[in-house]
Amino acid sequence: MIVGQARYWKNQSLVNEFILLGFQEYPILLFIVFLAIYLAILVGNGLILVVTTCDSALHTPMYFFLRNLSGLEMCYTSVTIPQMMANLVSGDNAISLPACATQMFFMLFLGVTECFLLAAMAYDRYLAICLPLRYMSIMNYRVRVGLVAGSFAISLPIQLLQIGLIFSLPFCGPNKVDHFFCDIPPVLTLACADLYANELAVYAENILFVAFPFFLILVSYTYITHTILRMPSSTGRQKAFSTCFSHLTVVTLFYGSGMLVYLRPKTPDKVLSLLYTVIIPLCNPLIYTLRNREVKAALRRLLGRKRSSEAGCEVTD
């Protein structure tokens, strides 16, 4: 079928841009909604960055990983939301093939990075709960920097190869992508060539860069659960579980929404895709602050220092 399609389009001219159909109804209303969400994501994650950087009490491995996760979420949403808002305002949904390839690359690269960063955070919780006496000696500065750097670097060459495979395909038309960003499944459906190698690469990437870190997270929490259940004190069990609750919630939302979108038989639904591209980055700052006494205390200290500084300036004047 695909080979026949390639023969059919053999003499047709290749397209040099795609049309992102996105969300076409109520453009002004949707622009206002997405602008508010985007600003909330930047402010919420930016606040976590500032608080965990400025407060020395939060200079621990757990908050080091949280700081990197917040920065990652800000970058991740910046790949899609500004483009979507620009399309809503201008009504021009065209995106060139190089721009589409760039957007797809950063979505894949940052998404895979988050998978491994969440796995590194699970490993950090495993050490803190299962090996508390050796925790700081094992999770030293060099190790945690290496884990974060490895999370960013591990998929970089593979994603470049993946993008090269996809955009070396001929796209003969139609050129309408039923999505609000350049995602692999809807873009591949527009190619007029044999997609066997591309589909094989996608499956391999899902196993290596999505299923494998998820397996590591499951293993970590299996040991964590076993250790918590063996604690003699109910207070100790509750305290140990509370340190994992925020991370476990983020993992559940991130992987749950991703599976809901990509394990469907058809092309991923663009409305459901909002879950992991927009809603979860919006919820993460709330998850890590509302139930976290240390972050809330650090925020109060930061605001208290700011008010004291302003009061000092007023007295000086």
Image (cartoon, helix red, strand yellow):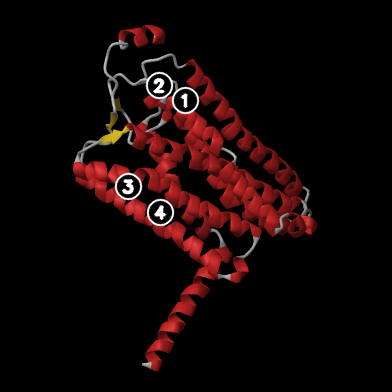
> Mark 2, residues whose alpha carbon is within 10 Å: few (<14), some, or many (≥20)?
some
Q: Mark 4 or mark 2, which is nearer the start of the sequence? A: 4
Q: Which callout, 1 or 4, points at the residue further toward the start of the chain?
A: 4
- Element on which disc 3 rests: helix
Answer left or right for 51 relative to 5: right
- Say which residue appears at 50% left-offset and 40% top-offset: 109
Q: Mark 1 points at which residue?
A: 165
Q: Could you say which is closer to the camera, residue 2 or residue 218? A: 2
Q: Nearer the viewer, mark 3 or mark 2?
A: 2
Label 2 with label 1: CB-CB less than 8 Å: yes
**Label ID, residue 82:** 3
Question: Residue extending furthest bottom?
Answer: 316
Residue 92 relative to residue 131: left or right: left
Q: Are marks 3 and 2 in contact (CB under 8 Å)?
A: no
Residue 267 visible in this rendered orientation of the protein: no
Provide residue 165's location: percent of width, then percent of height: 47, 25
Q: What residue type is labelled 4?
A: Ile
Looking at the picture, how far across and down is residue 124, in whole percent?
A: 67, 51
Separation (CA) of disc 2 from disc 4: 36 Å
The image position of residue 194, as x and y in percent, is 43, 14
In the image, which disc is placed on residue 169? 2
Q: Earlier in the sequence, mark 3 or mark 4?
A: 4
Count of numbered tags: 4
Going from N to C along the chain, the mark reached first, 3 or 1, is 3
